[in-house]
Image (cartoon, rainbow, N blue to C red):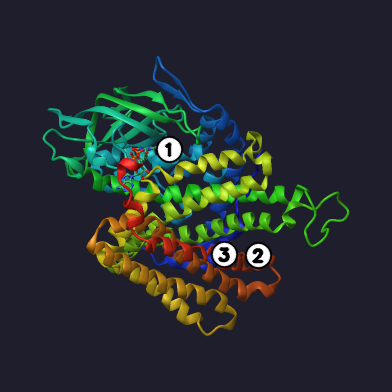
């Protein structure tokens, strides 16, 4: 069975040495009291919960899956999931970064992010139950009426109730403008919602006493397309005026999907048969309100992928040191054994280092973004809030798509380190690969993320936000440009920065002639910009490692070697990506559809 050890040292490095997070957070009125000891203690306790409670039920949860009782429409999560959730609630973990007004602990998003990384490493399927709830909490917190907030937020904060996100319908996934679920206004101000949703994560289960569905539907006479969508909150059990549970609302699980991975999470078909709900936000403005949840979920998916990359890496390293096969080409490295451990072989190291560089780079970038999000939420300076909001909006599709694409590569490499044993269930490695695959698809496929990045976040504002982010990189390049030791990192960082600028302009010009050029280049483009972000993080980490490596702590020596690996073996992928992005639309569209 796979093991998991929370990477606390690396988390502390990112928080305290790379980002100086406590100093930055203290400047925000909401976090003026935060200190390093609290941060470290939360991480340590959170890590124990992930390792001791969630890891042991990951493999078994995958094997057992969820079961639906067709007569009652009730779903049972795998053995141990309910008990683990009870422990999670008892520990107060759902409340970590929630608003104190509703019973939350008011700690930074950044800390919650690390907590979720650890839980995702330990058990992604389980972690989706609280993950979806937290997204529902955020959407209601931002857009709920005072009554909705007082009814739902304290229970979502404590974790006694969980939440879902009901967007997808059988005929509509990416294009939500096509959705058909209907909401009929009632005399008492509520709505009766009818329709069918599919693929609803954590849609039905036995972990919590109530499930709060956030549902997109259309009002009568709503405009066609995405401008006619409204958001409703629909509880599984209606809630009485005193907060107690009332009668069952007709919102049922009609079936569970049999799927490739995350078996422990119930992916439910949800039937709404005149279920009673209330409107969240403005009529026909449901997508804007839902975007709060979708953006949180997109960062969450990056975090799921980071968690899987880390745990796959940890297990592959243990195996590679233990498994002996063949001798090193340069002669025996373990002459006392019948063969050398496979970690001596260059390509095994390449697979391990790829996963490590993706995990540590992803952790740095995700934490950097979470810190910007804390500033966007809590700064008392309106300009800073806006600048941070824009930066988070720019980085969100990159975190979602780049880190999940990387996790697919990394988990597959780590499985490969196990040879044929990686393909066998009991080692747990094939589960990481299967679990990671959905991260490239849900919450808007990675193609859709790349269109969002290039089209909406970059070209639509003439690259203004990208330029601001680029300015930070340019300042770092300037500061470190004279350091000889940093040249091996600064030169390629400056180079990829220039190339991104040129590529963006070139695609922008082509898109004037034909907007389909954006679709032709976007996926390659996102990966190039993802590497720009990673190169920036890795160069900053390399600087710290260079400064501290002579102090005798091997952590910095390893960091420096991983940075060198990243710049030498992973970043150069951008050369071919830029070529394929520049190859443009014609090779894709030349062939007549009939010839496919
Ligand atoms: C396990 C699982 C859990 C999920 N959880 C939830 C959930 O909790 N709540 C929820 O509402 N939904 C959920 N989903 C649904 C998920 O978000 C959708 O499957 C996803 O958004 C894609 O929609 P689709 O499957 O209809 O594919 P489609 O939209 O039909 O897309 C098919 C393909 O066409 C591509 N495509 C579409 N439009 C374009 C375009 N303009 N340019 C280029 N390519 C395009 C897509 O990228 C994709 O490759 C879940 C799905 C799964 C499998």
Question: Residue at point 72% right, 56% down?
Answer: 345
Question: Residue at point 68% right, 75% down?
Answer: 550
- Residue 300 position, x and y percent, is 43, 48
**Outermost residue, right direction?**
336
The C terminus, quarter of image: top left
Q: Quadrant of residue 389?
A: bottom left
| Label 3 packing within 10 angstroms: few (<14), some (14-19), many (20+) | many
* Secondary element at image label 2: helix
> Which residue matches tag 2?
558
Horizontally, residue 450 falls left or right of residue 88, namely left
Q: Nearer the viewer, mark 2 or mark 3?
A: 3
Q: Measured along the vertical axis of the image, is residue 577 above or below residue 195?
A: below
Decide which of 591, 383 is in the foreground and name it. 591
| Rendered-image quarter of ligand 1 | top left
* Secondary element at image label 3: helix
Residue 367 visible to an observer of this rendering: yes
Q: Measured along the vertical axis of the image, is residue 565 above or below residue 310?
A: below
Residue 102 visible to an observer of this rendering: no
> Which residue matches tag 3?
566
Q: Measured along the vertical axis of the image, is residue 2 above or below residue 273?
A: below
**Image marks 2 and 3: residues in contact by CB distance under 8 Å:** no
Question: Residue at point 28% right, 64% down?
Answer: 510
**Outermost residue, top direction?**
71
- Residue 221 position, x and y percent, is 11, 35
> Which residue matches tag 1?
159
* Secondary element at image label 1: loop
Horizontally, residue 240 falls left or right of residue 356, namely left
Ligand 1 is within 8 Å of the C-beta of the residue at disc 1: no
């Amino acid at each position: 069975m796979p093991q998991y050890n929370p990477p606390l040292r690396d988390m502390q490095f990112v928080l305290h040495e790379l980002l100086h997070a406590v100093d930055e957070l203290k400047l925000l009125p909401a976090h003026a009291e935060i200190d390093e000891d609290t941060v470290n203690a939360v991480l340590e306790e959170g890590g124990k919960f992930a390792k001791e409670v969630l890891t042991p039920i990951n493999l078994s949860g995958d094997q057992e899956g969820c079961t639906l009782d067709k007569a009652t429409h009730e779903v049972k999560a795998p053995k141990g999931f309910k008990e683990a959730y009870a422990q999670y609630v008892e520990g107060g973990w759902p409340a970590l970064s929630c608003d104190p007004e509703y019973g939350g602990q008011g700690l930074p998003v950044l800390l919650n992010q690390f907590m979720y990384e650890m839980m995702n490493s330990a058990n992604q399927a389980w972690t989706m139950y609280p993950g979806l709830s937290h997204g529902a909490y955020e959407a209601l917190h931002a857009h709920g009426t005072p009554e909705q907030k007082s009814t739902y937020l304290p229970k979502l904060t404590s974790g006694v109730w969980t939440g879902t996100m009901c967007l997808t319908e059988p005929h509509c996934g990416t294009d939500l403008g096509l959705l058909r679920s209907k909401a009929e206004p009632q005399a008492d101000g509520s709505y009766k919602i009818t329709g069918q949703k599919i693929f609803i994560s954590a849609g039905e289960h036995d972990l919590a006493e109530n499930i709060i569905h956030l549902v997109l539907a259309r009002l009568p006479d709503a405009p066609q397309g995405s401008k006619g969508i409204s958001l409703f909150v629909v509880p599984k059990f209606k809630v009485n005026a005193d907060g107690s549970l009332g009668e069952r609302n007709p919102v049922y699980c009609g079936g569970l999907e049999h799927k490739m991975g995350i078996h422990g999470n119930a992916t439910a078909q949800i039937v709404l048969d005149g279920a009673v709900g209330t409107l969240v936000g403005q009529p026909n403005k449901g997508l804007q309100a839902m975007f709060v949840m979708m953006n949180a979920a997109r960062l969450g998916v990056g975090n799921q992928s980071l968690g899987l990359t880390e745990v796959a890496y940890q297990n592959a390293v243990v195996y590679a040191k233990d498994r002996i096969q063949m001798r090193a080409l340069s002669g025996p490295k373990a002459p006392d054994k019948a063969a050398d451990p496979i970690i001596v072989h260059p390509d095994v190291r390449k697979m391990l280092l790829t996963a490590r560089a993706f995990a540590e780079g992803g952790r740095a970038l995700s934490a950097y973004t979470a810190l910007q999000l804390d500033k966007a939420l809590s700064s008392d300076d309106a300009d800073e809030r806006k600048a941070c909001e824009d930066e988070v909006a720019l980085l969100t599709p990159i975190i979602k798509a780049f880190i999940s694409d990387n996790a697919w590569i990394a988990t597959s490499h780590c499985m490969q380190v196990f040879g044929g044993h990686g393909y066998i269930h009991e080692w747990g490695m094939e589960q990481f690969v299967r679990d990671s695959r959905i991260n490239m698809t849900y919450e808007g496929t990675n193609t859709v993320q790349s269109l969002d990045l290039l089209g909406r976040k970059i070209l639509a504002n003439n690259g203004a936000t990208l330029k601001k982010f680029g300015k930070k990189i340019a300042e770092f390049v300037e500061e470190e440009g004279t350091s000889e030791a940093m040249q091996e990192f600064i030169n390629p960082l400056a180079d990829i920065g220039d190339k991104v600028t040129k590529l963006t302009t070139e695609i922008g010009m082509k898109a004037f002639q034909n907007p389909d050029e954006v679709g032709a280049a976007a996926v390659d483009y996102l990966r190039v910009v993802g590497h720009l972000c990673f190169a920036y993080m890795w160069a900053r980490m390399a600087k710290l490692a260079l400064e501290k490596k002579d102090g005798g702590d091997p952590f910095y020596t390893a960091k420096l070697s991983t940075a060198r690996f990243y710049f030498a073996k992973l970043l150069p992928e951008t050369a071919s990506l830029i070529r394929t992005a520049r190859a443009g639309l014609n090779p894709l569209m030349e062939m007549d559809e009939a010839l496919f």
